Image: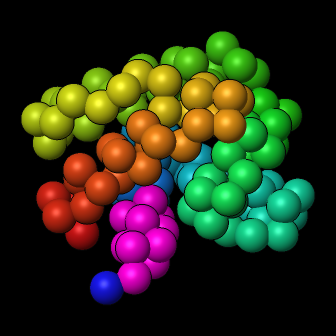
Amino acid sequence: MDERRDVEMALKIFLHKVFSDVAPGLVMMLESHVRLKLGKDLATSIIEEPNKVYEVLSKVMSEEALRILDKAIARYVFNKYHVRVDDSLLTELNKGSNKNLIRAALKLYGKIS
């Protein structure tokens, strides 16, 4: 098994399923902006350049909107899947950290795929 490929797949499923349920259409908008600015899909960019992903996200949405989205994602994941995830998955990308987002995606991989 290729661990990198598993992480990418888990992230793609997490982003598309969870984001689509929390904010329909948002993941398509974010995906297109990230691809336009960074030349890679959202999941790959989160793995390789989390701080640059945050820069793109913060240009599309305010930092306050990102914090609210973080909390909505954490609440949704807990209510729907009974799994606790960090409530700063997106805002921590600003620090170059993707660990909690990847951890959340891997936790839910079997539950939502």
Tell me the quadrant of the picture where the N terminus can be found: bottom left
**67 horizontally vs 36: left or right:** left
Comparing 86 with 24, the one in front is 86
Q: Residue at image x 63%, y 21%?
A: 65
Compared to 39, does 94 lie above or below? above
State the predominant SS element of the stretch in magenta.
helix
- Residue 72 counted in the magenta span: no
Q: Is residue 35 left or right of residue 20?
A: right
Residue ranking furthest to the right: 37
Q: Residue furthest bottom?
A: 1
What residue do we see at 36% from left, 26% from top? Answer: 86
Q: Position of residue 87 (x, y in %)?
A: 41, 22
Q: Residue at x 67, y 68 (%)?
A: 41
Can you give x and y, in whole percent of width and height, for residue 99 in the image? 47, 42
Residue 11 magenta-drawn?
yes
Q: Between residues 106 and 65, which one lies in front from this camera angle?
A: 106
**Residue that lies at the very extreme toward the top in this rendered image:** 64
Relative height, residue 111 to residue 19 (above, below): below
Q: Residue placed at 70% from the left, 30% from the top?
A: 94
Residue 9 seen from this side:
no
Does residue 17 appear in the picture of this structure?
yes
- In the displayed structure, would residue 4 be above or below residue 92? below
Tally the numbered discs: 0
Of 1 and 94, which appears nearest the observer?
1
Q: Which residues are magenta?
A: 2-13
Q: Quadrant of the C terminus?
A: bottom left
Q: Position of residue 72 (x, y in %)?
A: 40, 25
Query: Where is residue 37 shown, x and y percent of the image?
Result: 88, 58
Task: Identify the coloring.
Answer: rainbow
Give the left or right position of residue 39, taking residue 83 as reference.
Answer: right
